[in-house]
Amino acid sequence: MSATNNFENEIMKHLFTNDDLPNIGDATGLVGSTTAGSYYLSLYSDDPGESGAGTELSYDGYARVEIPRTGTSITISGADATNATILNFGQNVGVGTQTANNWAIFTALTAGDMIFYGDVTIPLSIVTGVIPSVPVGSLKITAN
């Protein structure tokens, strides 16, 4: 079984831009939140899998990056969402190297529920002084 392309598009808009999802339940559908809120992008050294049990990076200066659900941070096209702004993580101000191989999106800055995850296209070695950055259009999230 599969969702229709239209529904995939509508659910992604509801999740990432806080748009109403029409015709679900009554005529008003699933209404966007009064306060849109944010999601938070994290980096992992290994695949977090469905449970989020992978190893999130923890270098000095690291924190998850906020992605506001306002419609300006994410672009939706069909079942796909991509970042419309550059997403900068904190600079590695510690000693040592960590490698980002995977990413995940959470509902909170710390802990929270993981809602999407995937592989980093090209693993990123984060040495002292590096500011990990996700260029516009490089984060690709798919509903199907």
Image (cartoon, rainbow, N blue to C red):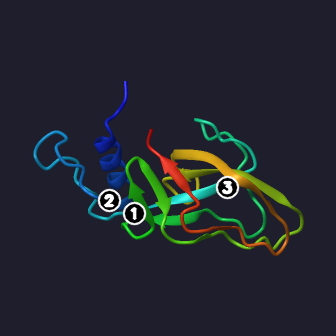
Q: Which mark is residue 144?
A: none
Name the residue type under label 2.
Asn
Question: Callout 1: few (<14), some (14-19), or many (20+) C-alpha neighbours within 10 Å?
Answer: many
Local SS, label 1: loop
Is 88 left or right of 80, judged from the image as shown?
Answer: right
Residue extending farthest right: 96
Q: Position of residue 56 (x, y in %)?
A: 70, 51
Residue depicted at 73% across the width and 72% down the height: 131
The x and y percentages for residue 57 are 73, 56
- The residue singled out by tag 3 in the image is 43
Which of disc 1 and disc 2 is earlier in sequence? 2
In-front residue for pair 66/2: 2
Q: CB atoms at circles 1 and 3 under 8 Å apart? A: no
- Residue 122 place in picture, x, y as percent: 73, 55
Report which residue position mark 2 lands on.
18
For badge 1, the amino acid type reads Arg
Quadrant including the C terminus: top left
Find disc 1 in the rendering and name its residue.
69
Quadrant of res 133: bottom right
Q: Secondary structure at mark 3?
A: strand
Please identify the quarter of the rendering in which residue 37 is found. bottom left
Q: Are marks 3 and 2 in contact (CB under 8 Å)?
A: no
